[in-house]
Amino acid sequence: FFFTVSMGLVSMEAPVLAAVTASAERGAAIALSTAGAWRCLRNAQLVARLKAFLSEPGPDADAEERLGDLLSSPNGIASLETAASALLQDAGASMPTDLQGLLDLLVVSLAWITDGDGKPSVPISLPDPRCVLCGLTVTSEWAGVPVNQRGVPFPYDPFDESELGEGEELLGRSLLRSMVQPLGAPGYTLWIKQKPCGHVLHDHCSVKMYAWRDSPQEAPTCPACGVARTDEESAWQFGFSGTPYELGLETTSEKCDDPAWRALFDPRSVGAIRGWLPETLSAELKKELTMAGASAAARLPDRDVSLEDGLARLLLTPGGP
């Protein structure tokens, strides 16, 4: 995948990176608080094992060294806990520059530390999958009703690109087929776990990272930590997609709820990805949407989704209008 975004929609500049990083840091702060990790880190033996683990070569040597130094300083853990508490109290807060990236690394590192019986020393688990680019997550129930996925097929084969064309058209159609279901409509989401950093993205948002490269030879980099991707894992998850605030998982909105942010990154909206499409495909989609007409509109599911988005989804379905 590689093409230059036709409208020059967005670049990975400091404000974008800062907002993406803040979302990832807050998820790590929640995981640490839920597991009671700060209390566990008062144990000198656990801290010693953690420092030994961080001293081994890893994917982000700079962050590992910074966290190791922090654990060795008298007030290091306390300063990290204070910063994490600020993230929990204010969804719009961000980590101090010298501490950025350390909460996420702490969660991952603690998950590897085990006791003599091979059990985790800290009962920590990573938060629910949350895309580090757009900020959306997935929940298994809506308004208290569990989702039922029986008989629902996967929407596409991520390894089959035979009908997507080549070059710019390949990337554009990959974005269209991997759109996330609208709020309130259950469906499958394909998650991409990046290696070596471990951050997750929607397949849709992962494709966008290829468009951000300066050249086709470059590996895409993680928008949360900047580490180059060398490999990836993928897995389907069925449920309702939305921001934590939309899904009722958080009581305050975040950057990903900002209309301006969603206009650029929302994986559920055709409007948000128009600027990512090559001009020929964008024009073709506009023409198809115009020609689809009232017959297609009549087939739209009864849910809160724009006419344009709904028509686009029908056009991407075999046997569409």
Image (spheres, rainbow, N blue to C red):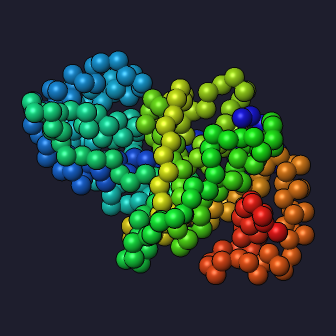
Q: Residue at x 72, y 61 (%)?
A: 317
Q: Is residue 19 visible?
A: no
Q: In this view of the protein, which residue sits in the foreground, 79 or 258?
A: 258
Residue 209 is situated, as x and y percent measured from the top left of the image, at 63, 39
Give the vertical position of 106 relative to 30 (above or below): above
| Residue situated furthest front in the rendering | 151
Give the vertical position of 278 relative to 229 (above or below): below
Q: Residue at x 71, y 41 (%)?
A: 161
Q: Is residue 314 left or right of residue 74?
A: right
Q: Quadrant of residue 270?
A: bottom right
Residue 15 is situated, as x and y percent measured from the top left of the image, at 58, 46
Q: Residue at x 52, y 68 (%)?
A: 186
Residue 98 is situated, as x and y percent measured from the top left of the image, at 39, 35
Q: Is residue 76 left or right of residue 175?
A: left
Q: Residue at x 11, y 40 (%)?
A: 42
Q: Is residue 136 left or right of residue 32?
A: right
Q: From the image, which quarter does the C terminus lie in?
A: bottom right
Q: In this view of the protein, which residue sits in the foreground, 112 or 36?
A: 112
Number of numbered markers: 0
Residue 35 is situated, as x and y percent measured from the top left of the image, at 21, 50
Q: From the image, which quarter does the N terminus lie in?
A: top right
Q: Is residue 316 visible?
A: yes
Q: Quadrant of residue 96?
A: top left
